[in-house]
Amino acid sequence: MPRVVKLAVIPGDGIGPEVIAEAEKVLDAVTAGGDVSFEKTRFSLGAGRFLETGDTLTDDDLSAIARHDAILLGAVGGVPGDPRLKDANIERGLLLRLRFALDHYVNLRPSKLYAGQAGPLAEPGDIDFVVVREGTEGPYVGNGGAIRQGTPHEVANETSVNTAYGVERVVRYAFDLAERRDRRLTLVHKTNVLVNAGSLWKRIVDEVAGEHPDVAVDYLHVDAATIFLVTNPGRFDVIVTDNLFGDILTDLAGAVTGGIGLAASGNINPDGAFPSMFEPVHGSAPDIAGSQKADPTAAIGSVALLLDHLGLREEADRVSRAIEEDIAARSGARSTSEIGDAIAARVQT
Amino acid sequence: MPRVVKLAVIPGDGIGPEVIAEAEKVLDAVTAGGDVSFEKTRFSLGAGRFLETGDTLTDDDLSAIARHDAILLGAVGGVPGDPRLKDANIERGLLLRLRFALDHYVNLRPSKLYAGQAGPLAEPGDIDFVVVREGTEGPYVGNGGAIRQGTPHEVANETSVNTAYGVERVVRYAFDLAERRDRRLTLVHKTNVLVNAGSLWKRIVDEVAGEHPDVAVDYLHVDAATIFLVTNPGRFDVIVTDNLFGDILTDLAGAVTGGIGLAASGNINPDGAFPSMFEPVHGSAPDIAGSQKADPTAAIGSVALLLDHLGLREEADRVSRAIEEDIAARSGARSTSEIGDAIAARVQT
Ligand SMILES: CC(C)[C@H](C(=O)O)[C@@H](O)C(=O)O
Ligand SMILES: CC(C)[C@H](C(=O)O)[C@@H](O)C(=O)O
C-alpha cells in the first residue's frame, strides 16, 4: 500500500509563497512515481491573514495543523513599520507559537560551504557543521514583563527558563548526531555570566558526554564562538546551544557560508508526538517579494531535511545532491523559479 | 601647576601583565615632558591573587581603586578547567563587579580596519564604527537562580533587567557620539522575541531620536546584525545595544577588523562619579602567557581611550596615529615588547 504523508503547507508572507512554490516543485519531482505521496493542505497564515481577519493563529488552525505528519513553512512577517501591524507580533504569535505548541525542541540548522561557492570570508576553509539549537526554552519562553511602562521609571524584565528535562533531551539529540558525523561537539553558552543556566547546560553536557566517550567535547563562550565562525569555521562539527545563542549563531553561520538564502532548517519533535516543521532560516523579505529575486535554495534544502525526517533518505540525498550540483554550476543571476526548475530537473535523474 | 592623574593599574593574569607593560610604556612616552603626570598604583588582582589569598576583590580593594581617577586593566582569568578555580568566578567577582560598582554604564568599543591590514573578510570595505554597549543592566545583573540543582528536575533561570533610567543614559551617550561622528545610529536588539526589554529600548531610542533630527536611526535584530557585520560592516557608524548583545557583537567586530588583539575598550562612567576603566577586549590567554606572543595593540588602544576620556585629546590622537602607522608598517612577526617599543617610538615624534 502506498504511504501517504499529510503535509501542512504555510507559504506565509513576502517571498514565502515564491520560495515555497519552488520547494513544492522539487518535492513533487523527487517523489514522482515513488511509493510515497504527499497530501497537502495549504494554510493561509501570517501578516496577510492578520490584516484580513485579525487572526494570527487560532486554536482551530493549530489543531488542524497538528493533525498533519509534517509542516513546510515559507516565511512570515509583514513590512517592518507597517502601522496596521503595530499590535501584531506575527513572529511570536505564529512562528514561536507553533514551535512551542508542537514541542519543537530541536531546531536543526546545518551550515555548509559548497564547492564553487563564494562567501564573505577570504579563506573559508572546509565549512560543514550543524547547529542544534534548543527550541522550547531559554529567553524565548515569553516569561517577561514590565512595570511603569512608558514612563521614566519603567523596568522591563525578560526571564530565560532552562530545565534539566529540556536541556537533556536536546543535548542527547546533539550527541547522537555527532556520533553519525565527525564526532565533535561544541557547547556554546555564556557560563561565566549566565551562571545558573550555564551550570545546568555544562552539567548536562558533561553527564551525557560520559555515555559518548568517542565524541570530543569542547566548550566556547558565545562571544568567542562568533570569532571562530569567521576565523576558523572548520573547527565545528556539531554545535549545541540555547535558543537565543542558536538564533544568533545560525544567522552568522548562514552569512559565512554564502548567504542566508541557502540556510535550511528543521524545527523537530524527535519523539514524533507532534509534526515537525521545516523552513528556510531567512525571513519574508517584503522588499523583494513578488520580484522573483529570492533564492529558493534554503526552502528546497528544508525539503531535504523534511524528507530525511520522514525516513525518506534516498529522496533526501537526491535533493541535497541536486542543490550541491546546482550551486557548483551557478554563474549569472537567475530568477526564483529558474533556480527551482534547475534543481527539480536534477533530482529526477 | 602640573596636573596629576591617579591611575590604578590592574595587570591581571596570563598575557595581562605583558600587554600592560607595553601600554604603560606608551603612556609614559606620550606624556613625557608634558604638564600631566600619572601617579600609578598597582593592584594585584585576578586568578593569581585568588590562588594565593582566596580573595577576588575585597571591599578594601574596591574602595582603594575607587579613589583613583582612572583604571587600566590587562586581562583577568586563570587557566580554563583549573580545579583550584572551580568555585571562583573571576569574571563575575572581579571584572563585572568593578563595572557594576563603578557604574560603568557605557562600554565603548571602537572597531576599525586600518590601512594595510588583513582581516578574515574577502571584501571588508571601510570598517569604522563604535559599539556603545550598556554595561550595568541586561542579563548581566546576576538576578538568576536555580532550584533542584544537580537533579533531573533542575530549573535554572536568568533574568535580564532593563530600566528606562539605565537605557536612557546610554542611548543619550550613543546619540551624542553619533553627532560627533557620521551621524548614523543603529539600535540592535531582539524586539520580536524579547518584547518587554525590546519595547523599552525601542521607545527610548525613538524618544531621544526626536532630539537629534540630524542622526539617521536604524534598527536591526541581533541575528541580522551579525550578518551585516560580515557582509557589509561599512553600514555601521554607532551601534547602541544591550550588555549581552554588545558582548557578542564586539567580539565578532574584533574578528572582522583583523583580530581581537587590536580591540580596545573603555568602561566609562560619563558622569565622573566613579573612575572609568580601560581594557583590551581580549582575555588573559593563559596558553600564550609569558611567551611575548601577545599583541599589545588593544591594550595600547585602550590607553588612547583613557587619554581621550581624561580630556588629553592631543595625546590620545598621537597614540591612535602611532597605532595606525605601526599597523600599516607591519610585516614579520614581532614580540609583544617589540610592538610596544615601535609604537612608543612613534608617539614621541
Ligand atoms: C522570526 C524570529 C522569531 C526567529 C527566531 O528568533 O527564532 C528567526 O530569527 C529564526 O531564527 O527562525
Ligand atoms: C569576561 C567576560 C565577563 C566579559 C563580558 O562578558 O563582558 C568579556 O567577554 C568582555 O567582553 O569584556
Image: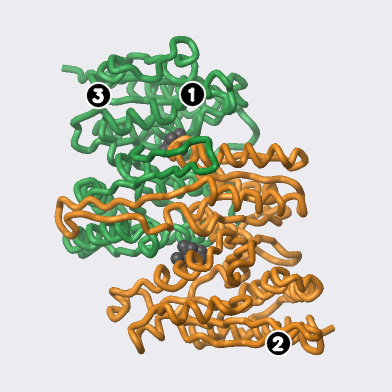
Chain colours: A green, B orange
Q: Is the residue A194 above or below the residue B265 in the image?
A: above
Residue that carries the numbered disc 2 in the rendered image? B341
Q: Residue at x 35, y 62 (%)?
A: A191
Residue that carries the numbered disc 1 in the rendered image? A87
Q: Which amino acid does label 1 sit on?
A: Asp
The answer to whether residue B131 is left or right of residue B176 is: left
Upstream in sequence: badge 3 or badge 1: 3
Foreground pick, B196 / A117: B196
Measure how far apart labels 2 and 3 are at the Cα level: 67 Å
Q: Is the residue A255 above or below the residue A345 in the image?
A: below
* Mark 2 burial class by Cα count in 10 Å: few <14, some 14-19, many 20+: some
Measure how far apart labels 3 and 1 are at the Cα level: 32 Å
Q: Which chain carries label 3?
A: A
Q: Which amino acid does label 2 sit on?
A: Asp
- Which of discs 2 and 1 lies nearer the camera? The answer is 1
Residue that carries the numbered disc 3 in the rendered image? A69
* Mark 1 burial class by Cα count in 10 Å: few <14, some 14-19, many 20+: few
x and y percentages locating residue A256 in the rendered image: 53, 50
Q: What residue type is labelled 3?
A: Asp
Q: Are marks 2 and 1 on the same chain?
A: no
Which mark, by number, is residue A301? none
Secondary element type, mark 3: loop
Q: Mark 1 lies on which chain?
A: A
* Mark 3 burial class by Cα count in 10 Å: few <14, some 14-19, many 20+: many
Marks 2 and 3: CB-CB under 8 Å?
Answer: no
Q: In which quarter of the image is residue A144?
A: top left
Q: Quadrant of the C terminus of chain B?
A: bottom right
